[in-house]
Amino acid sequence: MELAKVVAQALVEITLCVVTGLVVGVRLLFAWCFGRMRPHVVRDAPPDCLHDPSLGRHRFIKIKDVKLHYVEAGYPDNPLLVLIHGAPDFWFTWRRQIPDLSNDYWVVAVDLRGCGDSDTPRFRSQYSTPQLAQDIAILIKLLGRTRAHLMCAGVGGRVGWYLCYNYPQLIGKMVLIHSPHPFVIRQHMQTSWKNYYRAWFLFFVRLPLLPEIAAHANDSGLVDSLLLPFMKGGTVTEEEIEAYKFTFSRRDDWRGPLHHLRQFDLRWVGDREGTPDVITKPTLLIMGEADLLLPIDTAYRSAEYVERITVKPVPGSGHLAHISRAAQVNEIVGEFLRELPWRPLSPLEPAKSSSLVGRVMGASLAAVNSTVNRTSVALEKTKAFPGGLFSVAQASFKAAESTLGLENMY
């Protein structure tokens, strides 16, 4: 039975690769034949926002066989906070966070291999999650630190999860932007065939060459499709879109980001496959509620594999909440990083998968945290009522929170 499921999934993936490739290829050919393809604009100089002094200082560092570019801000004497972007993206995605976080932390926003100004290895096998995690581990050590906090977005969260499992001695706290546990994502994908349809692009990018052509065509049209909705909402400027188009101005500039997406693990979760270990690192998982592919439920299910976790839903946002809801995200992250850590529940890092206490505690804390968040939202709505109802309700809630010891819980 399990073999039949694996075969069925393989057939679905092959079908999606072929179908999406044909659809995209025909659309590109149609646009080119009928003159609907915008010509490529030559961009010789970067926009000023890419060299904004308030975003930090640009640095390069050689790590084994690649040279990585990163932007640092803040004082090196402060705790180290490494920012890891998703794909397709580069360090600039953290432009709303760097000025705020650099007041209290030594912020290092790194370009993963193949992205931004970092070196671009040729083969997709050179972009595996273990390799990316090793890059970050070496970077932390070369920066002269024995421990760092992580903040990861999107598929960059795979690197954060891997580091917590395999380099726990290097990690203090971890912040994830719309990056549920990879095992939970795999489980979620197989709950409905509709999920494979929604994730069609993850199968399309597995094709050779055509995804790079499609991303670069129409004057880097993929950038427009990703960011123009944010510009209409007023959270992204035209200059910032130009910064992305300058960074991805050549077809080869898309190879690295697409190789990252090609590493996305969508394997079927078999009945004989063991469950992941439980990590003990304090974790904050910020989830946009407007993403159909990864609903908020995947965040709470991720709590089964973390002993100490906070789940923060961000209404009206998707996988780029750190851009569309930057002020709210910055406040949440700042509070989380400043909080004192709990006493470890287990001396093991990571805890063994048989740790029932860790699983129950992680899921319980996430559920309690969800209740706290939703109750706070409900109390905010009572501000509109007269007679100081909100003040009374808020004071009562805070008193109960303090009594139960929830104010420091994560």
Image (cartoon, grey):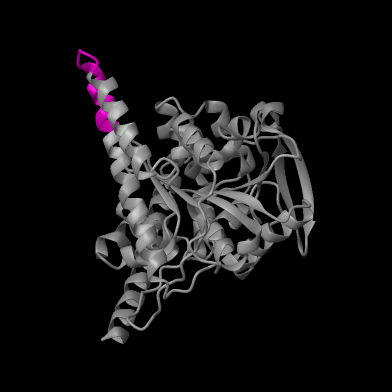
Q: Residue at x 30, y 68 (%)?
A: 190
Seen in the picture, residue 329 relative to 148 is either above or below; the reply is above
The image quadrant of residue 267 is: bottom left
Q: Is residue 222 left or right of residue 16?
A: right
- Say whether residue 135 is visible: yes
Q: Is residue 377 left or right of residue 288?
A: left
**Magenta residues, dominant SS class:** helix
- Say whether residue 40 is visible: no
Q: Give the quadrant of the N terminus.
A: bottom left
Residue 383 belongs to the span the image colors magenta: yes
Furthest residue in direction front, as rendered: 403
Q: Residue 14 in the image: x percent, y percent?
A: 37, 72
Q: Residue 4 in the image: x percent, y percent?
A: 28, 84
Furthest residue in direction top, as rendered: 386
Question: Which stretch is magenta?
Answer: 377-388
Q: Residue 273 in the image: x percent, y percent?
A: 39, 80
All told, the count of numbered labels is 0
Seen in the picture, residue 250 relative to 354 is either above or below; the reply is above
Seen in the picture, residue 332 relative to 186 is either above or below; the reply is above
Q: Nearer the viewer, residue 399 or 112?
A: 399
Q: Nearer the viewer, residue 138 or 196?
A: 138
Residue 6 belongs to the span the image colors magenta: no
Q: Nearer the viewer, residue 273 or 76?
A: 76
Q: Residue at x 53, y 41 (%)?
A: 339
Q: Residue 175 in the image: x percent, y percent?
A: 51, 48
Q: Residue at x 34, y 32 (%)?
A: 398
The image quadrant of residue 374 is: top left
